[in-house]
Image (cartoon, rainbow, N blue to C red):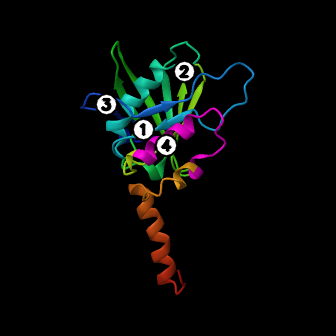
Amino acid sequence: MWTTAERATTISLSPPSEPRLSLRPPRPVGAVPTMLDGGWWPRSADPVAELPGLILALQAHDPAGARSPVTRVLLAVADWSDRPRRLRIDGPAESQVVRLGWFDTLPAGLLTAIRADGHRTDLLTVPASAGRAAAWAAMEAAADPGNRIDTPGLLATLGTPPGPARQAETEAPQNARESEGGRL
């Protein structure tokens, strides 16, 4: 059963920011699929502030040319500070509501945007705390048509601390183990 809070649509009060985004070129017919379609470097861990600009940019860059809207975004719980279920995106022509799905099972740093026509875009999400040079290098690697490295592998090259939710998640098991008489 859904609660009223879970059905509520969150509205970003700030205008969408220009996303720091690197997307791979359109894949030729018959080409081997890549692990990722590109990389994105948000400015914060706040999905309400960051996702509208990304979603509008993805819709403008529809590789299939159909201009199909993004209807759903799948996110790793540990990468974000808040977890709204629905987000209203105010675009240049009209508003739309995008459903957000939060998963513990998604690898850290993975964001999947799904369009109304079923096409999906898998992006490396670089932590906001990453350094400029390392972030752009990771995004370019994710957008490289020859990339065979997954999101955890690309994030490992950054050497940045975990996101806000992941930091608490990684500290809790260590503290629990210590209190149970185990060693770190």
Question: Which residue position holds label 4?
Answer: 137
Which comes before the other along the chain, label 3 or label 4?
3
Which comes before the other along the chain, label 3 or label 1?
3
Q: Tell whether label 1 touches label 4 (CB within 8 Å).
A: no
Question: Which residue position holds label 2?
Answer: 116
How far apart marks 3 and 4 lie (CA) works out to 21 Å
Q: Residue at x 49, y 26 (%)?
A: 71
Amino acid type at mark 2 = Ala
Q: Is residue 165 shown left or right of residue 143?
A: left
Question: Which residue position holds label 3?
Answer: 17
Q: Residues within 10 Å of mark 1 (few under 14, many from 20)?
A: some
How far apart marks 4 and 2 lie (CA) works out to 31 Å
- Residue 38, position as x, y percentages in the image: 54, 34
Q: Which numbered marker is on residue 85?
A: 1
- Label 4 vs label 1, nearer the camera: 4
Which comes before the other along the chain, label 3 or label 2?
3
The residue closer to the viewer here, 168 or 38, is: 38
Q: Which region shows up in magenta? A: 133-153
Whether 106 is drawn above or below 114: the answer is below
